[in-house]
Image: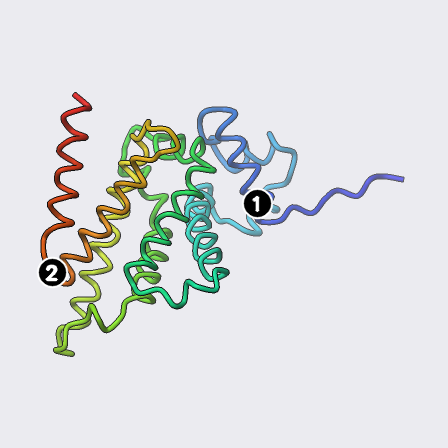
Amino acid sequence: MATKKKILTKDDIISIYMNEVLEKGHKPKSVFHFAKEKDFSEAEFYAFFGTLEGLEKEIFKLFLVNTIDLLHKNSDYQEYDMKNKMLSFYFTFFEILTANRSYVLQALKNDANPIRNLTQLTSLRDGFREYVAEILTDDYRLEQERFQKFQEKAIQESAWLQLMLTLKFWVDDSSPAFEKTDIFIEKSVNASFELMNVAPMNHLIDFGKFLFKEKIHSR
C-alpha cells in the first residue's frame, strides 16, 4: 500500500524555505526551482503564497506575531504602562530574532541592493505600527484632539525608525549573548519616552554616552 503523501502546511513551507536559504546561502531562483528541489508541487506553494517575496515578508511578520502572542500570554503584561510594554516587546522580539539569527542575517543580505532586502520588512512594519497604535495611551497623546492623528502617525514612524536602528545594532553586535543590544534597547527606549514626555534629559545623555563609547571602541 502506497504511503500517503503528507499535506504541507503554511508553517511547513516556511520552515523548508528557511532551511533552504541557510543550506544554499542564497534564495531559490524561482518557485519552480524551490518546489522541484524540495519535492512538492507549485500548487502547494501557491495555496499559501503568491511569490517567494511574499513568503519572505511572511517570515518577518511571523516574528512579530509570535512576539505579540508571547506577550499576551504573560498575565502581568496588560498591567504594564506603555514604556514597559515596549521594552517587553523589544526584548521578546530580539530573543526570537536571535533564535533565528542565521536566517535573518542571510535574508538581509540576499540582494546586493539593500533597499530590496528591506522590502522583506514591509509586512513587519505594518504590523508593528498597528502594535504601537494599540499600546499608545492617553499619557502620550496631545490634549488637542485635532493634533492627535498627526501625533500618532509621528509616534508610529519614529518607533519604526527606532526598531530599525536597533535591528542594525543587533546585526553588528558581537558581544556575548548580545548583551550590548540589551543595553541599547533599554537606553534607546528610555530616551524615546523621555522625548515623548518632554522630561529631564538624563536618559538621553546616558544613551549618548553609550553610543559615543561604542563608536570609540569600534575604531
Distance of mark 2 from mark 1, alpha carbons? 51 Å
What SS does tag 1 mark? helix
Determine the residue located farthest toward the right in the rendered image: 1
Residue 118 higher or lower than 77, as above or below: above
How far from the left and from the top, in percent, is residue 99?
47, 38
- The residue located at (21%, 71%) in the rendering is 139
Residue 104 higher or lower than 134, as above or below: above
Q: Point out the tag, 2 or 1, that comes first from the N-terminus.
A: 1
Q: Quadrant of the C terminus?
A: top left
The picture quadrant where one finds residue 175 is: top left
How far from the left and from the top, in percent, is residue 27?
45, 31
Q: Which mark is residue 45?
A: 1
Which of the two residues, 26 or 193, is positioned nearer the viewer here?
193
Identify the amino acid type marked 1.
Phe
How crowded pointer 1 is (Cα within 10 Å; few <14, some 14-19, many 20+) is rated as many
- Residue placed under numbered mark 2 in the picture: 199
- The residue located at (41%, 52%) in the rendering is 64
How far from the left and from the top, in percent, is residue 25?
45, 24
Which of the two residues, 71 or 167, is positioned nearer the viewer here?
71
- The residue located at (33%, 35%) in the rendering is 179
Which of the two residues, 58 or 102, is positioned nearer the viewer here?
102
Q: Quadrant of the N terminus?
A: top right
* Apparent side of residue 141 relative to residue 39 in the rendered image (left or right): left
What SS does tag 2 mark? loop
Q: Is the residue under label 1 in contact with that under label 2 (CB below 8 Å)?
A: no
